[in-house]
Amino acid sequence: MDPSRAFVKNVKRLIIKVGTAVVTRSDGRLALGRLGSLCEQVEELNSQGFEVILVTSGAVGLGRQKLRYRRLINSSLADLQKPQVDLDGKACAAVGQNSLMALYDSMFSQLDVTSAQLLVTDSDFRDKDFRKQLNETVISLLSLKVIPILNENDAISTRKAPYEDSSGIFWDNDSLAALLALELKADLLVLLSDVEGLYSGPPRDPQSKLIHTYINEVHQSEITFGDKSRVGRGGMTAKVKAAVNAANAGIPVVITSGYSPENIIKVLQGEHIGTLFHQDAHFWAPRKEVGARDMAVAAREGSRRLQALSSQERKKILLDVADALEENEKLITFENEADVAAAQQTGLEKSLVSRLALKPGKIRSLANSIRVLANMEDPIGRALKKTELADGLLLEKKTSPLGVLLIVFESRPDALVQIASLAIRSGNGLLLKGGKEAKRSNAILHKVITAAIPDSVGGRLIGLVTTREEIPDLLKLDDVIDLVIPRGSNKLVSQIKSSTKIPVLGHADGICHVYVDKSANMDVAKHIVLDAKVDYPAACNAMETLLLHKDLVHTGGLIELTTQLCTEGVTLYGGPRASKELNVPQADTFHHEYNAMACTVEIVDDVYAAVDHIHQHGSAHTDCIIAEDREVAEVFLCQVDSAAVFHNASTRFCDGARFGLGAEVGISTSRIHARGPVGVEGLLTTRWILRGSGQVVDGDKGVIYTHKDVPLDP
């Protein structure tokens, strides 16, 4: 189903507004066929459990037709030769309403459906007790499977010019339908018209195009309305105004033709008919194609505008992004669920599906992480060092954004949120390329985030790369892009490193080890080993290899730990020694990242053997020792050459948020620039600022160097 029509899944109560042009033919007589089709659709929806409320026009037109006939047969020839005075609209409404309801009652009775008439006026809605009673009455009727039919009581309306006056709480049946949708908490409003929907110009103009989704920012100034409706009060102009008001209040609206016999049913089946008005419509606007260089240049320009803002202004952007994520949680969840369902249908590995899913509470957690990041000390322009080079010549070393980042990541849409927030906090422009399996999730997250960025910076600060074909072009832009961070498989990282001159930061594999020494407290070991493997097996900081001191074979520690893992559903593979001891299949290689409920177990002689094993087979990501012997622990901590090395703590702690960085753009196993979880500081470089008063070098005779350290400002 088109994401813009996904709201129909949650529709229970709907209001259908029937215009005069639908109820009557061009000669003013009743359009019996169209009314019959409408009643049949309402009956079908009623039988399916939908709560249907009708707002109908047509009484004035029917009354006028009846009264003209009555005047004709009661007039003499002399009377007919006199100038004819137009009939009183209120009288027409009084006569026509009776006929209109008799017709609805007759047609619904044939379908074994009961209907009820409710007439209202504009002034009624000024009374809150009336509104409460109206609500209670309608709910009571719906509970009895009765169809409430509402209309403005033009016969007693106090509006001075009912066909011209557009003041008051409502001013025609379109605005009445929108008002009732709010009062009665409808899930959908359908406005039936005599055309297929809203067109860019007059519907009869061959150049006019049907607008499938109305986006206020795009279409407000582009639409040219045709003539007013041949009957009724407002025509399409009134419908659009009512639809915009209802949609802004959170009620989806569809304008579609009442001439087609199944259009209401089709709308509720999610078919792409008519024109949709929705408060999230701006998120569905098609993205204009932008070239790789244009996208990168736009990100750099946005970065410079972002840096020019005050610290408080940058902080507010992050807080606005956090709020926007929570406000759009339902929409984001829907898109993510669609990605997950598609991934499962295509047989994607369970570990990747797990990474793809935004589980309940994840959006709130991400929003809170962004708020933590926003409230941290501003990282841009922070003085790291001050030196007096000579009298009156002050040198400062200050933090500065890198410029433009290109992040290529797989599976995890939450990574997009973390990366985008870190880029904003660090003042960097950003280009993002997510995996195709998360296409819909990434698209909606990108739109939500960029919509929260003020125009003074521009949403193009963060660009979303949508096709794999764009990556080679971006990797050539070493004059515009300053750093590439790949987050994904070893193959992905290797391909990117071999394809660009741009510096690359990241890690290929997450082969994390936990070594349990003979001095370990076994209760502590059980908790840590289980958490490191089971807490989130698909994470890059999950344990993939368990190393056990040889003495644990005899003390029972080996059996205790492995039995616990098996009980939790972990599949064990062994090295040459462990496979024989445990009678489990031998692992093909020690250099393997399972990303699932499986791990390798091996027995080693001591801490030095464990260190050698990690250096030979590990990925320099995160490794842990569990030991009570402090000297043994210090050997491990000092000698294991990994980005993160832990003592008596789960490898799962290796995470930007858990380290207090607010979020992370990735975990780096590089040894240059940044290592381990890369937060804001890893996305900064430095600049030198020199302030003088006219000094020159002059062969180093122009000044007397003092090179004196100056205290940083508190």
Image (tube, helix red, strand yellow):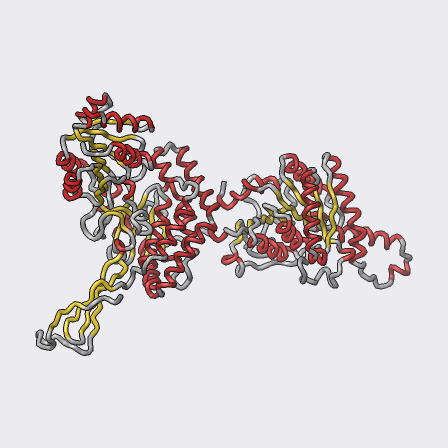
In the image: residue 526, left or right of residue 87: left
Please report the residue visible at 62 percent of the width from the left and 57 percent of the height from the top. 237
For the C terminus, the image quarter is bottom left
Q: Position of residue 537 (x, y in %)?
A: 32, 35
Can see residue 146? yes
- Image quadrant where residue 360 sits: top left
Q: Give the residue furthest to the bottom.
A: 694
- Image quadrant where residue 230 sits: bottom right
Q: Position of residue 120 (x, y in %)?
A: 73, 53
In the image: residue 329, left or right of residue 515: right
Q: Position of residue 689 (x, y in %)?
A: 22, 68
Q: Nearer the viewer, residue 45 or 548?
A: 548
In the image: residue 445, left or right of residue 657: right
Can see residue 490? no
Count of all numbered marks drawn on residues in the image: 0
- Image quadrant where residue 649 sits: top left
Please report the residue visible at 67 percent of the width from the left and 62 percent of the height from the top. 167
In the image: residue 360, left or right of residue 143: left
Q: Nearer the viewer, residue 702 or 629?
A: 629
Q: Position of residue 497 (x, y in %)?
A: 22, 46
